[in-house]
Image (tube, rainbow, N blue to C red):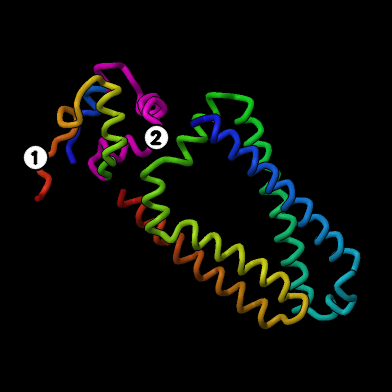
Amino acid sequence: MMEKYRKILQKRILLMAIAIISAAMLLLLQVSGFFGADLKSDFSNGMVSGFQSGLLTALIGVFTVFIIRYRMALKDQMKLKLFYNQENDERKKVIKQKSGGNIVIFYSVVIIFAAIIAGYFNTTVFYTLIACVLFQLSVSSLLKFYYLRKY
Amino acid sequence: MKTKIKELRKKHKLSQAELAFEVGTTRQTITSIECEKYTASLVLAYKIASHFGMTIEEVFDFSEVED
């Protein structure tokens, strides 16, 4: 079972590395002005592009930390078991399921990427999508907090 | 649900974290089960009971479970 989990972690490392490279390339294109020089022409556009850069930088940072943690776990059998237990803990799974869990995270990631892309063309769509993500994440967090106290 | 996990842990000189590690769960889950806030699944109940060399009924008290 641990061997299977080891392979899952290796696969995750690979996917995260691809995501980091993609985000870095997008960031580079944005900084170099590939998406148009008028993007920073007013406050709103400046904020959108700033949000996009910030999000991409955060994504790179978070995924890098995860890759380091996963690599450390892969080298240490004890840490690997702890990771496995954390991820497969049934109480956590119940709480996650009741608070929307994976589906909310999946939708949020998809909407954030849609917002980043939409931000290059229309700021109103960008703000609407971000508001939507913030709302669903807030509801999910509140539910998670409630069920963490309940169970 | 009432359980004997706490007494069994003390008898076997096991911490919550150690028991959690052995049965494949987290310390928080063991705490929740001991505090009767969370009811363990059949699989986890079996793992805990077998870890102490007992049956599920000996570790978990089903007397207050409604039909």
Vertical order, A19 against A127 (above or below)? above
Q: Is residue B64 left or right of residue A57?
A: left
Q: Mark 1 points at which residue?
A: B63
- The number of numbered discs placed on residues in the rendered structure image is 2
Closer to the camera in the image, A10 or A66: A10
Amino acid type for the residue under numbered disc 1: Ser
In the image, which disc is placed on residue A86? none
Instruction: Give coordinates of residue A50: x percent, y percent.
Output: 76, 67
Closer to the camera in the image, B53 or A131: B53
Instruction: Give coordinates of residue B61: x percent, y percent.
Output: 14, 35
Q: In this view, does B3 lie to the left or right of B48?
A: left
In the image, the segment drawn in magenta is B9-37
Residue sitting at 58 percent across and 74 percent down?
Answer: A131
Q: Is mark 2 on a helix, strand or loop?
A: loop
Query: How far, Cα to Cα, is label 1 from label 2?
Result: 25 Å
Residue sitting at 54 percent across and 35 percent down?
Answer: A5
Residue sitting at 64 percent across and 30 percent down?
Answer: A72
In the image, which disc is placed on residue B25? 2
Residues packed near mark 2 inside 10 Å, few (<14), some (14 to 19) or many (20 plus): many
Amino acid type for the residue under numbered disc 2: Thr
Q: Are marks 1 and 2 on the same chain?
A: yes
Q: Which of marks 1 and 2 is nearer the N terminus?
A: 2
Q: Is residue A142 left or right of residue A15?
A: left
A53 is within the stretch colored magenta: no
Vertical order, A82 against A129 (above or below)? above
Residues packed near mark 1 inside 10 Å, few (<14), some (14 to 19) or many (20 plus): few
Q: What element carries label 1?
A: loop
Chain of the residue displaying label 2: B
B15 is within the stretch colored magenta: yes
Vertical order, B60 against A129 (above or below)? above
Vertical order, A121 against B4 (above or below)? below
